[in-house]
Amino acid sequence: MLGRRSIGGAGLLGLAAIGGCHGGLAFNALVLLVSVGIFVGTILLERSP
């Protein structure tokens, strides 16, 4: 569980850095939506029996 979350965190930091370099607001919003969706999805999967 911890490994999956740390990998996701590293991926989010990488995507945020790429988005910051390009400076695309729409791209940043898309990354945020996708990252939140993945985060919520992993939480739901971990809680399911």
Image (cartoon, grey):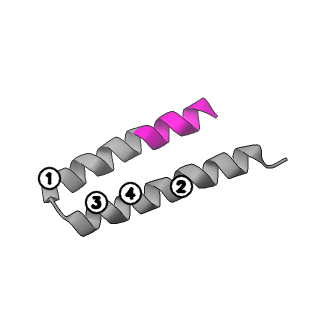
Q: Amino acid at mark 3?
A: Asn
Q: Amino acid at mark 1?
A: Cys
Q: Is residue 15 above or below residue 5?
A: below
Quadrant of residue 19 in the image?
bottom left
Q: Judging from the image, what secondary structure is the residue with disc 3 in? A: helix
Magenta segment, which residues? 1-9
Marks 1 and 4: CB-CB under 8 Å?
no
Q: For the residues labelled 3 and 1, say whether their Cβ atoms are less than 8 Å apart.
A: no
- Give whichever of 11, 33 is nearer the camera: 33
Name the element at disc 1. helix
Q: Residue at x 57, y 39 (%)?
A: 4
Q: CA distance from mark 4 to mark 3?
A: 6 Å
User: Mark 1 or mark 4, which has the lower sequence index?
Assistant: 1
Q: Which residue is mark 1?
A: 21
Disc on res. 32? 4
Q: From mark 3 to mark 2, how far is it between C-alphas?
A: 15 Å
- Expressed as whole percent of the image width and height from the top left, the position of residue 3 reads 56, 33
- Residue farthest to the bottom, as pictured: 26
Compared with residue 26, is residue 21 higher up or lower down, i.e. above or below? above
